Amino acid sequence: MMSEHRMIKAFARFRFCLGYLVAVLTLIGSHWTAAADMRQPPGSRVKMDVPGNFETSKLFSGFVLPVARTSIVIAELPTNRLDQLKAGLTDAALAKKGIKDIIRAKLKRDDDHVYLVGKQTARGAVFNKYVLLIKDGKSVAVITFNVPEDAIKDGFVTQEIVKKVFTSTSFTAKAAPIIKQFSLGYLGAFKEAGKLMGSAIMYSTDGQLVPKVKGIQRSVVIIAPSVDRVRVHDLKGFSERALKSVGGFTNVKLAETKGVTIAGLNGAKSEATAVSSSDKTLVSLVQVVLDRPKGGYYRLLAILRDSEKAKLMPHVEKLIASFKPVSG
C-alpha cells in the first residue's frame, strides 16, 4: 500500500503536470482576433497580429510570452539605414553573433522583404531566431522572434504562429504613443526627436529624428534603458566598453571615467573623442551609465560636434543631471 508521503508526492507531481498541460493547451488553443485588433508597441509604427497571450514588453519595443521565454523584438530605423541592416543579416555577420544553421525563404507577402531562420545558443539554451526585415518610405524594421527549442518541442510556439505573425506585420502611418521609462526636467537646446531603437529616445537640436542633410553628423543625445534586467556589476568597465563600441565612429579615444550619482542611482561617467565615419568630423562623446533599480541600466549618450561642444556641453550637463527614472 502506498505510504501517505508517497501519495502526497504523487499528487503534487500530478497537479504540476495537469497545470503544465492546461498551460500548453491554452497556448496552443489561442486564436487570433480580427485585423482591427492588431497591436502596436509603444512608440512604434509596426503593427502585427500577435496572439492575445503575448504581453507588451516594458523593457523593449515588442512583445513577450514569459511562460515560454519567447520574445518578439522590433528595431526601427530610418530608411537610409537599409543597406547597413541588410549587411548585418548576411551569413557572415550573423555567424559573428553566434547564429548558425541559417535558412532563407520568402513569406506570403506582397513586398520586398528578408526572412530567415537560424539557431543561437544563449544562457545555456538553444533559441530559434526568426528574422523579418521590411521597409516603407519612412522606416526599416527588423523583427526578431526568439523562441527556445523547448518551447517549440512543447508546442508553446510553432512555426505556423511565427509565419502568421510575420505575414500580418506592416507599418502604420502614425507611431503609437511612447511610454517613457524616464523623465527629463531640462532639455535646453535639445528637443525630443522620437524613438530610435527598442526603448531608446533621441534628442536633437532641431527635433528631427532623421538629419535634413544625409551624411552630416549631428549633435544629439540618446537615452536608452537596457532591454533586460541583468545586473551590471562593473559599471566603470561596462561604460568604457560601451563607449568604445559606439557604431558610426572611428579613432575613439577615452579621456576619463569617474563615478557619479544621479537621481539616487549610482553610475559611471565616461568621456571620449572620436571621428564620425559619415563626414569625418571630430566629435566629443559623453556617456553616463546608471544602475537601474531591479537590475539593468540606463545609458545616456551625448554626441557633440567639436564645433558645437562649447555651446552645447552646459545643456548636456544639465539635461543629464535632470534625469529621473520612472518606476515600473
Image (tube, grey):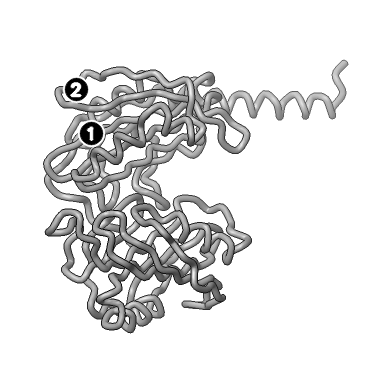
- Residue 164 in the image: state x and y as whole percent: 29, 23
Residue 258 placement: quadrant: bottom right
For image coordinates 19% across by 50% down, the residue present is 175
**Quadrant location of the N terminus in the rendered image:** top right
Considering depth in this image, is 132 or 51 the residue closer to the camera?
A: 132
Which callout, 2 or 1, points at the residue further toward the start of the chain? 2
Q: Position of residue 198 (x, y in %)?
A: 35, 50
- For the residues labelled 2 and 1, the Cα–Cα distance comes to 10 Å
Q: Which residue is mark 1?
A: 134
Local crowd size for mark 1, using a 10 Å CA cut-off: few (<14), some (14–19), many (≥20):
many
Work out whether residue 4 can be spotted. Answer: yes
Q: Which residue is mark 2?
A: 109
Residue at screen point 51% across, 36% down: 69
The residue shown at (39%, 32%) is 145
* Residue 315, above or below 245: below
Residue type (three-letter) at the residue carrying disc 2: Arg
Identify the image quadrant of residue 287: bottom left
x and y percentages locating residue 308 in the rendered image: 25, 76
- Please give left or right for residue 79 compared with residue 97 in the image: left
Secondary structure beneath dot 2 equals loop
Kind of element beneath mark 1 = strand
Residue 158 sits in which quadrant? top left
| Amino acid on which disc 1 is placed | Ile
Whether residues under marks 2 and 1 lie with C-beta atoms below 8 angstroms apart, the answer is yes
Q: In the image, is residue 204 above or below residue 319?
A: above
Q: Residue 70 location, x and y as percent?
A: 46, 34
Residue 5, which numbered label?
Answer: none
Q: Is residue 10 left or right of residue 4?
A: left
